[in-house]
Image: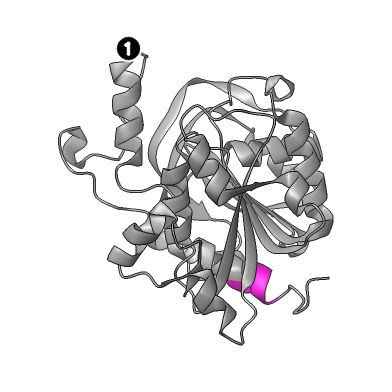
């Protein structure tokens, strides 16, 4: 699948070196195809890492994707340069009159704060409310999913006794739903969080259907009717070394952190961790784009 990006986006060269077809604006303009317009609200601190991870995840269908990166104005990024943000990102006031085929709202490292204490909470809730009328399907990741469940359904998050950190086994709960088409009965996925939305709260919400969960990590995947909103409680987009980098960061800061579970071969942090979740992640994003964006969105976005 060709992904349309700005010519100078740093992730572009890495993706091309991985033999992923990336298209710039000029070539896209000369094709008689309407690409799917995907808006990515990137709340992660290392924005360039997340850009690469999500673009890679969206690269496995024959659909052409036109990606717009969105940032919040009410928070100043400490880990991404202003030059990068000014060149490759837009703000909500610049897109709120537009419509998009799909949207991704990422996680953020603010989960131990109350939602209302997050400095961009008001802006985020405005974006989430706007998405219901202006986006065909919105996919929420980790804290983004917790925030949406709280805002839309009033579900509280709860602090865990220790960080849920590693690669966990999940099982499919409802095979009839297209989002899990092609999933194995059991599959692995990364988690990295200090909080949870309790499984019973999600199961008891009539507006939601649970599609996959874990005995250790709880609900992993839930969906509203017809896939208007999708909630992924883990991080399927993570690269091979993302959990390792998080582990070493916290360890070097002297924070209480255990090595990520089920991640290193023989639980040895000096070993190269095997990829155990990439095929599942590709399947998830492909199914989302195909069944909940491409198959449903109107040809003309008015």
Question: In this rendering, is residue 140 above or below 177?
Answer: above
Question: Quick check: can you spot residue 55?
Answer: yes
The spot of residue 99 in percent (x, y) is: 77, 62
Quarter holding residue 97: bottom right
Q: Nearer the viewer, residue 78 or 83?
A: 83
Question: Quick check: can you spot residue 176?
Answer: no
The spot of residue 193 in percent (x, y) is: 50, 30
Image: magenta residue range: 290-295
Please give the name of the residue rendered at 33% of the width and 15% of the height, measured from the top-left corner.
253
In magenta stretch: residue 61: no
The crowding category of the residue bearing disc 1, from other C-alpha atoms within 10 Å (few below 14, some 14 to 19, many at least 20), is few
Please give the name of the residue rendered at 35% of the width and 37% of the height, measured from the top-left corner.
243
Q: Is 276 positioned to the left or the right of 63 in the image?
A: left
Please give the name of the residue rendered at 18% of the width and 43% of the height, measured from the top-left corner.
272
Return the residue at label 1: 254
Please give the name of the residue rendered at 67% of the width and 69% of the height, measured from the top-left corner.
293
């Amino acid at each position: 699948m060709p992904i349309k990006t700005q010519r100078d986006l740093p992730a572009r060269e890495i993706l091309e070196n991985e033999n992923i077809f990336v298209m710039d604006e000029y070539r896209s303009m000369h094709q008689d195809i309407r690409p799917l317009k995907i808006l990515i609200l990137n709340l992660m601190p290392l924005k360039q890492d997340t850009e690469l991870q999500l673009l890679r995840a969206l690269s496995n269908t024959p659909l052409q994707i036109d990606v717009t990166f969105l940032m919040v104005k009410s928070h100043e990024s400490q880990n991404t340069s202003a030059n990068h943000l000014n060149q490759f990102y837009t703000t909500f006031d610049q897109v709120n009159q537009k419509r998009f085929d799909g949207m991704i709202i990422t996680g953020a490292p603010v989960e131990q704060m109350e939602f209302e204490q997050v400095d961009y909470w008001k802006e985020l809730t405005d974006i989430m409310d706007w998405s219901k009328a202006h986006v065909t399907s919105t996919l929420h990741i980790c804290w983004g999913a917790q925030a949406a469940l709280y805002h839309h359904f009033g579900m509280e998050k709860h602090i865990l006794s220790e960080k849920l950190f590693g690669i966990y086994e999940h099982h499919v709960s409802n095979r009839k739903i297209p989002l899990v088409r092609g999933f194995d009965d059991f599959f692995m996925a990364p988690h990295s969080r200090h909080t949870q939305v309790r499984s019973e709260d999600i199961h008891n919400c009539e507006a939601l259907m649970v599609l996959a969960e874990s005995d250790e990590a709880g609900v992993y995947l839930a969906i509203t009717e017809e896939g208007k909103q999708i909630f992924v409680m883990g991080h399927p987009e993570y690269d091979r070394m993302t959990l390792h980098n998080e582990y070493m960061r916290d360890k070097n800061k002297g924070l209480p952190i255990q090595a990520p579970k089920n991640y290193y071969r023989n639980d040895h942090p000096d070993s190269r961790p095997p990829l155990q979740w990439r095929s599942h992640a590709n399947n998830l994003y492909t199914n989302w784009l195909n069944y909940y964006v491409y198959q449903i969105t109107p040809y003309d976005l008015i």
